[in-house]
Amino acid sequence: MSRKEADFYVLTHEPGHDQEALPLWASAREGLIRFDDAPPPVERVDLPDLPGVFQLHNVLSPGECKQFRLITDTLGFHEDAPVSLPYSVRHMNNLNWLVDESICATLFGRCQPQLTELIGGAPSLGLNARFRFYRYQPGDFFKTHTDGSWPGSAVVNGKLQADAFGDRWSQLTILLLLSGDYEGGHTRFYPEGESGEAIPVHTPLGSALCFPHGGHPQHYPHAGEKVRQGIKYIIRTDVLYGRTPESEKIQRRWMY
């Protein structure tokens, strides 16, 4: 039996923009990523030209990044994705993996000390287990878009529970860089709107780029520059925050 067959299974299939059934993978057991025993502390750097946007450094080691890359290449990527955007806009390969609690808890434990802001009066409660992996090869890009909000998903009694908690919703995007040996591929933010000047941001290997999304007032249009050389791997997930009357007002401005 291969590692793919032993350690993963297709939890369900979801419709994409073009295909009817894209696999949502799930972990068959915990401990699929061997995390370092003594990682350095995560450091936060706020980007002064982009209020609300910041980077977290030392989230993953190079070895941990390599493990994620090897797993996702084994599971296999698709041009389509279970979102409303076509490949002409989201021009890269996609894979969705509903990771197990050992992965979510470890990464959130590293990041949480730097996630100090309350959003809508609520604290951060965890990461969305729905990890969306993107692989950009030379010529790939992501046109200008905005990110939607998501509930926290989980496997419950062997089935996908899209809103597994009922008391939390995402307010912050995390883009976690799994590779660094590529050229191009900066994230370009448009704080004054799509017609305004772009601010490019490069995020190093093992670091996370974090920014508000959904109905948050600091939610900026952004794009992924074309990759010129090499392969860019990223994880997109979300920070989940508690639901309060104020955060519900923010959330109602944008549903997905």
Image: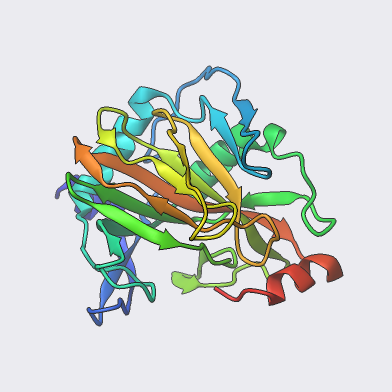
Q: Which residue occupies the foreground of this view, 238 or 228?
A: 228
Q: Give the residue drawn at x 78%, y 50%.
A: 123
Taking depth in this image into account, of 243 and 186 the one nearest to the observer is 186
How was the colour assigned to the protein in this rendering?
A: rainbow
- Foreground pick, 157 / 188: 188
Q: Residue at x 35, y 52 (%)?
A: 133
Residue 54 x/y as whole percent: 61, 37
Image height check: is 151 above or below 60?
A: below
The quadrant where residue 5 appears: bottom left
Q: Residue furthest front?
A: 196
User: Measuring 71% from the left and 57% from the top, which residue is drawn there?
Assistant: 241
Q: Quadrant of the C terminus?
A: bottom right
Residue 31 lies, in percent from the top left, at 42, 39
Residue 206, located in which quarter of the rendered image?
Answer: top left
Relative image position of residue 186 (x, y in whole percent): 38, 40
The quarter of the picture where residue 9 lies is bottom left
Residue 41, horizontal then vertical, whole percent: 60, 20
